[in-house]
Amino acid sequence: MNPSGPSRSPLLAPIPTQSTFFIPSPSEHHMFHPHATLNIASRVTLQSAGVGLLISAVQNALEKHDQGALGIFTRTGGTIAFFAAMGFTFSFTQAAVSNARETDDALNGVAGGCAAGFLAGVRARSLPMAVGSCAALGAAIGTFSAAGNALTGTDRLSMPRPEREERRLQFFKQPKIKQDEATA
């Protein structure tokens, strides 16, 4: 035995440093790094305004009017501003809550989704819709965050190929063995 502490055995596997669960392991040490709230919010605002521009262009193309291509901004331009406001509200709230709680988990996404959903309900001028959108978007984004920010749940590409193949084969039904083949 080492007087400064127990000796490390090379035969034991190292303790994982990060858990993949929603609730962090007590054995893992995580140092929180503050988020640049306005930097993140401005970047997401520009990205979501780009998505809003695309949606506005589709709306403009599907409607009959005499505005031409300028209708993207004059007739359906509110869509661009709405998407930008939703992106800003979500990302700002998520980063601010994360900084206030000094942790990165799914509850930050729940708060951001709730704020963005509430904004969607306010646009519809309905308090019940605002509360319902807050709950629905908060639950959806919180679930997505708790699942590891991936629709598949796990990062399959980081798994070794034989393990992926074994997992793929377990997904399908296995053919039943007939009594004749089992006794032969």
Image: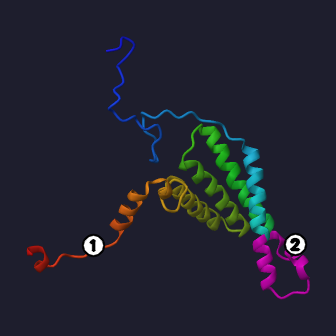
> Which residue is depicted at the point 45% across and 43% down?
19
Please state which of residues 93 and 21 is positioned toward the viewer in this rendering. 21
Front-lying residue, 95 or 123: 95
Q: Is residue 72 magenta?
A: yes
Give how far across and how far down residue 91 sits, in percent.
Answer: 69, 52
Q: Main secondary structure of the magenta part?
A: helix
Could you say which quadrant of the image residue 121 lies in? bottom right
Q: Which labelled disc corresponds to residue 73?
A: 2
Look at the image and give the residue range highlighted in magenta: 54-78
Residue sitting at x 65%, y 64%: 130
SS of the residue at dot 2?
A: helix
Q: Amino acid at mark 1?
A: Gln
For the N terminus, the image quarter is top left
Is residue 111 toward the left or the right of residue 41 in the image? left
Residue beneath the point at 57% across and 43% down: 104
Residue 36, by quadrant, is top right
Q: Position of residue 48 (x, y in %)?
A: 74, 61
Toward the front, the furthest residue is: 184
Please, what is the three-letter code of the amino acid marked with disc 2?
Phe
- What is the number of the mark on residue 174? 1
Q: Secondary structure at mark 1?
A: loop
